[in-house]
Structure formats: structure tokens, C-alpha cells
């Protein structure tokens, strides 16, 4: 290995932006020239040669540490001048001040290295930007989170470390745990405090999941371009209206826009329905999940009839014309009410809200996407996978941290919703329905009127 100084480079007419010496790997024939190299270069070469026997990664690490030392030296020289350079008292900014030991981040560990020191003429320590970059723990925290989410136990992080040929620190169980807590706490704060005013919100999906006997309500936004964004969560004993209302109120306080109209897709929970109505009023159009409704109805039926009824329900909910679909559902309910009255009652409950998307005039892929809660259920599935490895839940704070981490992890694999090409049509239809041009009542000769509620005519 030959290390070429900046001075030699400049003498050959090559312009360099930064005075950082170059590390060059030589051919075997050039090894004989090592005898003419300075002692420091020979020692560095010996260190790299030892690392080569441990593999390419260890060799690359050793070479990288050599380059880092050269960068530190070059930066300090750019501030106080090269070592042993004569300067007048008025020109001198600072002085070389020996070296000290410090730790830099290397993969998922810290390693101790020597670094040059400098002091200003007034006595203050010279901070090197290069050192700040290599000593930053941001990358270390990122690696810890990635491995924890991949299922690596805190006590096993030292075992899965890269073979870099350097002894490391900060790999103990407690150190890994502290960094994971700090990283996930920061991620949760970013998720729950993010400004939502920049989101062009079109659809809001809300659902709950049970974590160690406690209900957590999570929210997902679908923007006007079809992108999905997790926006919040709330911890409570049950999926009740108060928890939902507080979650939605927090979203509004953070800038969530809904005045133009918003489509809320829920699983049919009355608590979710009540909370949405209290916060958004008539600006929200409710679409209940058709899959949940089908499961709920067939649960009231004997096994012999379930398949046939479920197929009929699927056909009904796929009807393009909302009025025809509702009429078909009522006929099926009349058929069931004699032998299975509870199944009939379940089918009729909230029936109009099963066809909200159909009333908006949507058809095709986007309609199938928004008539169920599969988008948010997919996110919840990832959350369950992340939290499933936790054996002991000490408090609610830990639950929120892990759930927020799972939501962020799910977002990494998000794609735009299926049928996103139809999103402009959906946004326009929601705006017309939630904010009709003429929201007044037309009174007929009998003194009755049709009041527009949520954009759909309703006799009052």
C-alpha cells in the first residue's frame, strides 16, 4: 500500500478540493518498495495485512479507519496549519495538542481509536466535523432497531455482529436496550406529533387491536394520490367512543383537514361511528366494511347455510347500483328473519352505510379497496408481528412505543392503494356529497321536505 501525500499530488498539477491523503492498494510486485516507506506507513500496512486474513470486511474496515485518521489529520491541519509549520503569532489560530482516545461507531458497535487534538490560542478545544460524523450514534441506533425488528434478542446482538476485525463496545444487553428505547421513543414522538396539515386527506381508516388485554385504536390516512400514512394511535381499556373521539380530536389539532369532506372506513363498531360523528359531523361519510358485515351475519347461521348465504351477500355488496343492492339485502333479511332473526337483524343494522362508496359513483378496483378495511388490517398485521415477540409488557408506554414502531415498519412497505388512478374521481365525489351546493330543504305542498345529509337525500 502506498500513501501519496497531497503535496506530491499538487506538484504533478492535479487539483484537489480537500487536502486528504490518498490510500492506494499496490500490486504484489510493488511490495518490495515498502522498505522505502516511512515507518508510520509500514505499521499501517501491517495492520491492514493482518485484517486481510480475517476477510474482506475486516480488511475494508481497517482501510477505512486509516482513511478516517487521514481525514481527521487533514481537517485539523486546515484549521491550525500543518505540523511544524512556522507561523507568525498574529496568523496562528491554534496549535496541535497531541492526541486522545475516543469512540466511533462501526456497524452495531463502538470502537476506540486515537484521534489528533488541537487547541485554539485562547485555550478552547478544537472540534472536528469529521469526528462528529463518525462518532454520531444515529447509525448505531438504526442498526439496533433493524435487528430488534428482525427478531434478534438484545443478548444476541454481539453474536450477529459483522466480522470487522475490531473489538467493540456498546453491544451488551443493557446498551442495546437503551438505544432501542431511545430510538423508538423518538420515532413514536415523530409519528404522534407530526404536522398533518400538509396531507391532502381523502380517506380515514380506523381500527383497533388488542395488546395484552388492552385495546389500542390506530388511524391510517389515504391521501388524494393514493398514498397511505399512519397518523395516530390511542390506548384505552376498550374501543369506546371517548378513546376514538380523543384520537380524532388530536388529529384535527395537528392539522388534519376534513372540511372538504372525508370518507371514513370502519369495521362497523358503534364506538367508532359515534366518535367520527362527534368530531367530523356531516363532513364525514361513513363506509362500513363489507367483509366484517359478511362474517358477522354468517356467524349467526348454522354451518350448513353459511357458504350459500355468504356468496349471496358478496354478490349483494358488489352491486353497482346502491338502491338495488339495499333492496336485495332487505329481501335476504326477510328470508332469514323467520328461522334466523338475529342474522337478519345484523344484516339490516347500518345497511345504508354499506353502500356509501357505491353512492359516490365509484366502481372497479378502488371501490373494492374502500369497501373494506384491508388497508389498515394489513398495517395491524405487521404491528402484531412486531409486538408478538414481546413477552412482558411493563406499562402502557412500552405498548405505545412498540405499536408505533410496528406502524412505522409497516409504512416502509406501503404502496399506493389499488385503484389509485380513480382517486381524483373519489375526491370530487366526496366534496360534492359532504358539501352540497344547495344544502337547503325543498318543501313540497304537504309541508314535508328532503334534507341533504352527507350529500344523500333523506326524508325528514
Image (tube, rainbow, N blue to C red):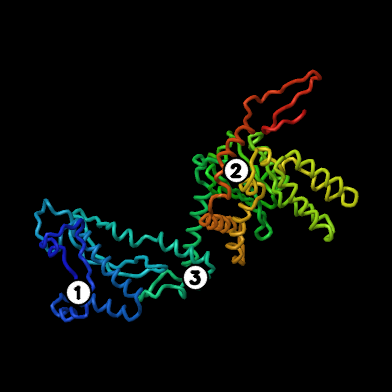
* Dot label at residue 314: none
Identified at 56% across, 47% down, the residue is: 231
* Residue 372, horizontal then vertical, whole percent: 67, 49
Residue beneath disc 2: 203
Callout 1 secondary element: helix
Q: Residue at 50% across / 60% down in the picture?
A: 181
Q: Which residue is mark 1?
A: 41
At a point 15% along the width and 75% down the height, the residue shown is: 38
Q: Marks 1 and 2, Cα distance to the nearest angstrom?
A: 63 Å
x, y percentage for residue 446? Answer: 81, 19
Of label 3 and label 2, which has the lower sequence position?
3
- Quick one: quadrant of the N terminus? bottom left
How far apart are the two marked residues, 3 and 2, measured between alpha carbons?
42 Å
Q: Quadrant of residue 388?
A: bottom right
Of 29 and 141, which appears nearest the observer?
29
Query: To which residue does mark 3 refer?
Result: 173
Amino acid at each position: 500500500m502506498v500513501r501519496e501525500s497531497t503535496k506530491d499530488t499538487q506538484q504533478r498539477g492535479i487539483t484537489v478540493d480537500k487536502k486528504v491523503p490518498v490510500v492506494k492498494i499496490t500490486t504484489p510486485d510493488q511490495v518490495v518498495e515498502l522498505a522505502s516507506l516511512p515507518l508510520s506507513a509500514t505499521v499501517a500496512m501491517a495492520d491492514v495485512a493482518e485484517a486481510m486474513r480475517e476477510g474482506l470486511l475486516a480488511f475494508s474496515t481497517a482501510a477505512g479507519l486509516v482513511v478516517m485518521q487521514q481525514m481527521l489529520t487533514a481537517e485539523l491541519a486546515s484549521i491550525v496549519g500543518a505540523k511544524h509549520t512556522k507561523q507568525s503569532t498574529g496568523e496562528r489560530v491554534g496549535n496541535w495538542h497531541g492526541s486522545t482516545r475516543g469512540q466511533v461507531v462501526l456497524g452495531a458497535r463502538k470502537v476506540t481509536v486515537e484521534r489528533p487534538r488541537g487547541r485554539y490560542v485562547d485555550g478552547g478545544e478544537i472540534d472536528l466535523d469529521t469526528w462528529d460524523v463518525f462518532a454520531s450514534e444515529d447509525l448505531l441506533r438504526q442498526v439496533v432497531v433493524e435487528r430488534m425488528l428482525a427478531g434478534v434478542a438484545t443478548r444476541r446482538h454481539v453474536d450477529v455482529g459483522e466480522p470487522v476485525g475490531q473489538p467493540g463496545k456498546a453491544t451488551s444487553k443493557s446498551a442495546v436496550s437503551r438505544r432501542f428505547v431511545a430510538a423508538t421513543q423518538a420515532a413514536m414522538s415523530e409519528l404522534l406529533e407530526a404536522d398533518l396539515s400538509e396531507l391532502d386527506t381523502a380517506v380515514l381508516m380506523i381500527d383497533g387491536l388488542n395488546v395484552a388485554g388492552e385495546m389500542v385504536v390506530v388511524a391510517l390516512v389515504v391521501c388524494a394520490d393514493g398514498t397511505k400514512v399512519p397518523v395516530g394511535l390511542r390506548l384505552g381499556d376498550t374501543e369506546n367512543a371517548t378513546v376514538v373521539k380523543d384520537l380524532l380530536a388530536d388529529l384535527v389539532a395537528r392539522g388534519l383537514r376534513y372540511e372538504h369532506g372525508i370518507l371514513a372506513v370502519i369495521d362497523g363498531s358503534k364506538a367508532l361511528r359515534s366518535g367520527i360523528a362527534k368530531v367530523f359531523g356531516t363532513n364525514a361519510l361513513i363506509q362500513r366494511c363489507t367483509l366484517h358485515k359478511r362474517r358477522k351475519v354468517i356467524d349467526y347461521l348454522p354451518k350448513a347455510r353459511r357458504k350459500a348465504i355468504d356468496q349471496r351477500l358478496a354478490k349483494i355488496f358488489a352491486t353497482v347500483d346502491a338502491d338495488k343492492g339495499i333492496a336485495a339485502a332487505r329481501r335476504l333479511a326477510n328470508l332469514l328473519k323467520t328461522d334466523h332473526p338475529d342474522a337478519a337483524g345484523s344484516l339490516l343494522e347500518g345497511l345504508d352505510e354499506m353502500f356509501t362508496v357505491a353512492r359516490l359513483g365509484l366502481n372497479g378496483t378502488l371501490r373494492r379497496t374502500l369497501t373494506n378495511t384491508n388497508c389498515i388490517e394489513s398495517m395491524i398485521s405487521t404491528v402484531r408481528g412486531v409486538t408478538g415477540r414481546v413477552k412482558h409488557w411493563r406499562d402502557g408506554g412500552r405498548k405505545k412505543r412498540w405499536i408505533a414502531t410496528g406502524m412505522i415498519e409497516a409504512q416502509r412497505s406501503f404502496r399506493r392503494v389499488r385503484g389509485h388512478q380513480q382517486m381524483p374521481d373519489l375526491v370530487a365525489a366526496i366534496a360534492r356529497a359532504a358539501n352540497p351546493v344547495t344544502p337547503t330543504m325543498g318543501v313540497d305542498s304537504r309541508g314535508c321536505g328532503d334534507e341533504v345529509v352527507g350529500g344523500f337525500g333523506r326524508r325528514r
